[in-house]
Image: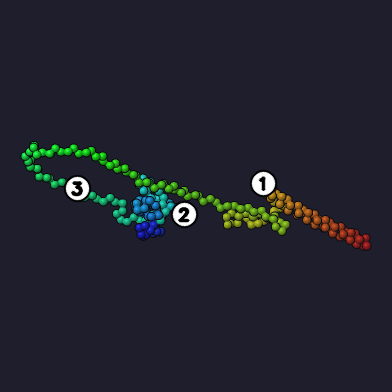
Amino acid sequence: MSAAGQGLSEDDVRNFREALAAGRKPKVVFTAAAGQIAGQVGQVVELTDPAASDEFVVVRFGRDELPFSPADVAVAPRGAGRKPVEAPAEPPAEEAPAVAEPEFVLDRVPAQRSERREEPKVETVEAAKPARRPVKAAKPKGPAGLTVTLAYADGEWTVAAQQGSKALAKPYVVKPAEALRMVALVDVPGVHEAVEQILAAERAEAEQQAEKLRAELAEIEARLAELREAG
């Protein structure tokens, strides 16, 4: 168990969860980390998810239920927050009846009228209540991001897909026409120009190879014709 003023330990938090599950509301005392309410006593009414917020200890203080971090509160010592029992007031002792004495009118001094004094006004200042801290709602964890990559290297277009750290589809080859249709979905002029330049260069290279092959084929056919004539 943590010492008073040192905040809650992991064992304290575990004991609080067991106590709340049993229907009890453990008492805590605010530490210096809680600010102006340090030394005050409250009741733990709920423990939220520590992964969603550092302030997961919900404490009832007065009429408010506010979230605090484990460093803001500590386990309250026994008897903290209880009002001391007042001893019953003893009845006043009966005074003996005063004996009337003879009154001498000639020696009697008239009593002076007491001046009216104004009682000082006491203004009560209410203690400032701590600002209510908003409870941070835990954000639901969404699905991992999906990445689809269209790449060009060594004269081939490839497509790959990955979700988070998991590879959904390894890079596989697609036709240039399919790659051009994919790029057409991206409304970025620079990307379109880059793809058109790549396709133009591939087209020019293919045409050169075709011309070379046609020339070689023509030579082979001419040679074949000569051999036929010789036979």
Which mark identifies residue 51? 2
Please state which amino acid type lies under the numbered disc 3: Ala
User: Considering the image in quadrants, where does the C terminus appear?
Assistant: bottom right
- Label 1: how many Cα within 10 Å (few below 14, some 14–19, many 20+): few
Residue at image mark 3 = 89
- Label 3: how many Cα within 10 Å (few below 14, some 14–19, many 20+): few
Does residue 178 appear left or right of residue 87 in this picture?
A: right
Residue 51 position, x and y percent, is 47, 54
Q: Earlier in the sequence, mark 3 or mark 2?
A: 2
Please state which amino acid type lies under the numbered disc 1: Asp
- Which of these two is toward me, 230 or 77? 77
The residue drawn where x is 89% and y is 59% is 222
- Note whether residue 25 is visible: no
- Note whether residue 60 is visible: yes
**Snapshot quadrant of residue 14:** bottom left
- Which of these two is toward me, 128 or 136? 128
